[in-house]
Amino acid sequence: MSADEDQSEHELMRNFKLENEDHTLGTLLTYILDQLPETEFCAYTIKHPTENVLYLRLKVKKGHDVTEIFKKGVIELKKALDIVEEKFINAMDEYENQS
Amino acid sequence: MQTIKLEEHSVKYVPISQTGSSIEYWDVKKFKKKLNIKVVNVDKEDMSMEFDLINIGTPFVNAFRRVLLSEVPTMAIEKVHVYNNTSIIQDEILAHRLGLVPLKADPRKFSFPKNLENDAITNPEECLEFQLKVTCKRNAKLSTRSTDDDFRDCKNTEVHSNLIKWVPIGEQALKFKPEDVEPIHDNILVAKLRPGHELDLKLIAVKGIGKDHAKFQPVATASYRLLPQITLEEVVQGEKAQRLKASFSPGVVKLTTENNIITAKINNPRYDSCSRNVFQHEDLKDIVKISRVPNHYIFTIESVGALSPNTLFLESIQVLRGKCDKLLSEIKAKGKNCFL
C-alpha cells in the first residue's frame, strides 16, 4: 500500500473519547451510527468500570468525513428522541381523553 | 416476524434480522412511521404507570430505563447540621436516614448546587432548608405509669417524617407552599427517643442524581419486558383445563363451561410471569407454545412521588437530549479536533 492510500484510509476512522458518559449513551449512539449508510464500522468500549470514559470507534465509507458522520449520528439520535417525546405526549393525551 | 420462543429449558435464539428490527439503513421517517406508543395504565394514587413501546430499538428502551434510575434529578437532604443530638442514634446514622426521606419538592425549580463541598449552602435557587426540633418529655399529668420502663405517657418517643418542617429562605415562601416541598410520606420513622432526649437539626436539601446517591433516585423501579404470547395447539378440556389455568399467572387462562364441559381459553397473556410452569405437565407440554413478541416493550415506571411517572419519562428524554446537545456543542467548538 502506498503512503497516500494509507493516509486516506486513516482519515476514514477515528476514536472519539467521551468523558463522563457510560453505556446509556454508548449503546444508543452505536445503535444509530451502525445503521447509517455511511458507516463502515462502529463500536464502543468502556475500558475500565472505574474510569468514566467511553471510547467510540467509528470508520466511515470512502468519500465521507468521520466527524461529520459522528455529528450526523448525534443529530439523528436527537430527532428520534423528539419523535418518542411527541408520540408519548399524544399517547398520554389519548389515555386521558379515554378515562 | 418471528417471535422469541420460550422452550422448557431454553430460549430459542432468533437472529435480529428476523425480529422486525432488522439493520436496514437508519431513516427517521421510517422510525416515526413504525413507532407506536400506547399508555396502558396510569395509577395516580400509586404514582405508577405502564405503557407499550412498539417498534423501538432495545438501546432506546434501555437508555430510558438507565436514565430514569440514575440521571433524572430529584431533591434530597444532603447536609445535616447537628446542633444537639442526645438520642442513642449516632449523628451520621441519623443524617443518612434523613437523606433517604423522599421530598415532594419539584427538582425542575432548582439548580444543581455549584459548590457541594460547602457546608452552608444558602442560595434559595439551590437548596431547601428544613428543621427537625424534637424533645422527648414525660407528661406529669399522665403519671399512670407503673414502672420507669413504661413510656406510654411520653411525648415524641417516635420521631416521624411529619416533624420535618420547612424553613423558607429568600423568596421561597412566595414560590412554594409547605405541602409542595415537605416529605411525601408522614409516617417514616426517623429515630426513637426516650425522656430527656433531644434532637435539634438543620437539614439542607439539594438537587442531585441517582448516580451520585440512591436517595436522589426519582423512581422506585423503572423496568421493561417483552410482551408474552401464548397459544394452544389443541382444545384443552376438563381437569386438564384446570391444571392449565393453574400453571399460569392469574387472569391469563379463562375457563368456560358449556354443556358441563370446561374448556380453557387463553384470555390475557400480557400479565403472565412466563414461569413456564406448564412444562411440568407431560400431557400439556406439547400443546402450549409460549413466546415473546420482539419489539413490543412493556415499560413500567413507579415514581417515588415527587414527579408523576409520565413527567419522569419526559424528563428522561430531556436528559438524553441534553447529552446530545453537549456532544454537538463540543463538535461545533472544536470541529475535527473534538473528543480527542
Image (cartoon, coloured by chain):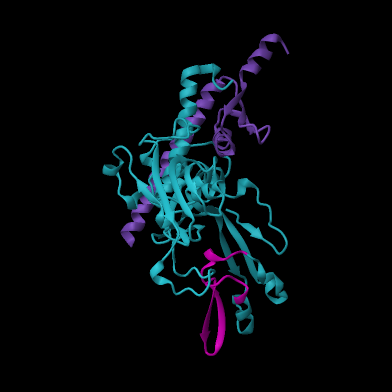
Chain colours: A purple, B cyan
Q: In the picture shown, does residue A56 fall above or below B309?
A: above
Residue nearest the viewer, comparing B211 with B18? B211
**Among the 4 quarters of the image, the one containing residue B74:** top left
Q: Determine if the magenta segment contains residue B167.
A: no
Tell me which residue sits at (61%, 31%) in the image.
A54
Q: Answer whether residue B198 is visible to the viewer in this image.
A: yes
Q: Residue B53, percent across and down?
A: 48, 51
Furthest residue to the top? A3
Furthest residue to the left? B174
Which range is magenta? B246-274
Relative placement, left or right, of A47 versus B97 is: right
Q: Residue B36, percent across and down?
A: 44, 50
Q: Residue A62, percent across and down?
A: 60, 21
Q: In the picture shown, does residue B180 fall above or below B31?
A: below
Tell me which residue sits at (45%, 59%) in the image.
B136
Residue nearest the viewer, comparing B309 with A45? B309
